[in-house]
Image: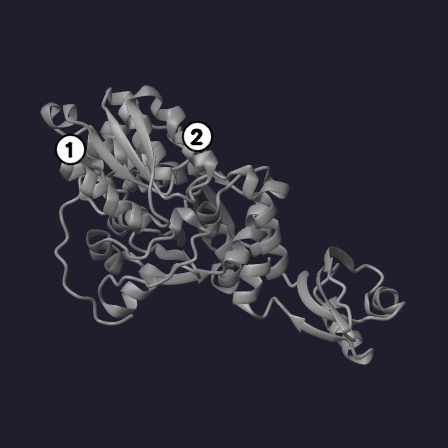
């Protein structure tokens, strides 16, 4: 990491936040996970913030900040911008404090998160869908705040928000004592705007300084990664919004000022790997996690050698996963694992060409999951969009060998991001 630009760090009141939140939030469990521990030959503990009241840790920061605002200021109302989880924590806090709130969310936000926000806030909140990304939404929310003389409650870049998120770390270090007398060697923490890792990392550096803090971002939204390499927050031109709970174009100035000092390693996790982990956690552990919540577990494969024999904590940051997204999650997982492939195949326009493809090119366990063919008149070949699901990754090489052997005219769509995104 390059030499970091000097940004003054404000004081955090983590102990005060823990007291304010004690009767408001769930003290979520820190659970030993036998399957992951066996797989990686270490002791893996999951901090289950997916079991929080609003199914993510975000309520901690929102309530901590709002509960400290003067009554006169609260009476004018509060505003937030969020991709979903902060919105739900904010909405619950509005209802708990009896305050009027306006929630700005990106238009592509999962419907599940929009509905949950309205449910948690009841009659105390109004939801406005504006912009394509969190950053677009935040601009609109701040303008609305100024126009109406209200108070903006940011999702991450505020000392009271960071202090609230830090209480996740307070609970981890309280609970680990009942599980083991050994120190925590690695803490895996998801990073979006940086509030969670800034707070938990700061608390750990004071209370458990030997713990290595690993920050995690999706490959398609590496805002903290580039901030640390540049020495200051930078705004990314484009991001993949799939991991909506951790996809921001720019991390906060305040969160960066803490993260640059507490993150020991910043790691990027492929979106496809995250999807595979979501499915594994559901099928093997009966745990429902959202993409950002799966990152800490998804990263373990890349640290398998380092964590062997160690004490590991993974923060499962949230479980707000819309069931409507599961088909996309499965699709991304299969593609990442090398089991799903798409081709544009130009079949010779003669009887038997498709039968020849099925009988000679495809393996006995290859499955056609998509087939779109348009017959072209007065042409020698007609194009078809073909989706194939393989039983094992090794079957891909056999498939390509057969395509060449039987002189099939094809293009692989998986290897062209633009065409893949357009057609699939």
Up the image or down, 254 lies above or below 235; here it is: above
Gap between marks 2 and 1 measured at Cα: 25 Å
Residue at label 2?
115
Q: How many marks?
A: 2
Residue 7 place in picture, x, y as percent: 14, 59
Judging depth in this view, the residue of 153 and 229 nearest the camera is: 153
Q: Nearer the viewer, mark 2 or mark 1?
A: 1
In the rendered image, the vertical position of residue 206 relative to residue 77, given as above or below: below
Residue 158: x, y in percent? 20, 44
Viewer can see residue 144: yes
User: On the rendered structure, is 378 left or right of 180?
Assistant: right
Among the 4 quarters of the image, the one containing residue 114? top left
Q: Residue at x 43, y 40 (%)?
A: 318
Q: Crowdedness of circle 2 by 10 Å Cα count: few (<14), some, many (20+)?
A: few
The mark found on residue 148 in the picture is 1
Q: Where 286 sits versus 25, above or below?
A: below
Residue located at (14% from left, 37% from top): 147
């Amino acid at each position: 990491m390059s030499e970091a630009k000097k940004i003054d760090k404000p004081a955090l009141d983590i102990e005060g936040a823990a007291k304010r939140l004690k009767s408001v939030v769930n003290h979520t469990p820190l659970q030993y996970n036998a399957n992951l521990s066996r797989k990686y030959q270490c002791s893996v503990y999951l901090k289950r913030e997916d079991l929080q009241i609003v199914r993510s840790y975000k309520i901690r920061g929102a309530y901590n900040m709002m509960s400290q605002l003067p009554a006169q200021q609260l009476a004018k109302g509060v505003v937030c911008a969020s991709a979903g989880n902060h919105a739900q924590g904010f909405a619950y806090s509005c209802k708990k404090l009896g305050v009027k709130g306006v929630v700005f969310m990106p238009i592509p936000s999962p419907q599940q998160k929009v509905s949950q926000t309205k449910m948690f806030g009841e009659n105390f909140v109004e939801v406005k869908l504006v912009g394509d990304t969190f950053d677009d939404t935040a601009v609109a929310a701040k303008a609305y705040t100024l126009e109406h003389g209200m108070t903006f409650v940011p999702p991450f870049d505020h000392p009271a928000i960071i202090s609230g998120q830090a209480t996740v770390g307070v609970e981890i270090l309280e609970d680990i004592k009942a599980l083991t007398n050994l120190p925590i060697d690695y803490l895996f923490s998801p990073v979006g705007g940086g509030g969670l890792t800034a707070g938990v990392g700061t608390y750990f550096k004071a209370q458990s300084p030997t713990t290595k803090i690993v920050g995690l971002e999706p490959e398609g939204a590496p805002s903290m990664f580039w901030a640390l390499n540049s020495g200051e927050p930078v705004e990314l031109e484009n991001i993949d919004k799939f991991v909506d709970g951790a996809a921001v174009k720019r991390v906060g100035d305040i969160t960066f000022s803490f993260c640059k000092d507490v993150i020991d390693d910043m790691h990027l996790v492929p979106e496809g790997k995250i999807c595979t982990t979501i499915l594994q956690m559901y099928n093997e552990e009966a745990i429902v996690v959202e993409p950002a919540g799966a990152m800490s577990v998804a990263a373990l494969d890349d640290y398998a050698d380092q964590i062997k024999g160690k004490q590991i904590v993974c923060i499962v940051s949230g479980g707000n996963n819309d069931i409507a997204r599961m088909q996309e999650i499965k699709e991304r997982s299969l593609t990442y694992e090398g089991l799903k492939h798409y081709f544009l195949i130009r079949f010779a326009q003669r009887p038997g060409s498709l039968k020849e493809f099925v009988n000679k090119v495809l393996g006995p366990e290859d499955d056609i999951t998509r087939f779109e063919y348009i017959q072209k008149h007065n042409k020698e070949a007609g194009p078809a969009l073909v989706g194939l699901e393989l039983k094992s990754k090794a079957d891909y090489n056999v498939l390509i060998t057969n395509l060449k052997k039987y002189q099939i005219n094809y293009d692989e769509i998986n290897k062209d991001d633009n065409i893949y995104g357009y057609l699939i």
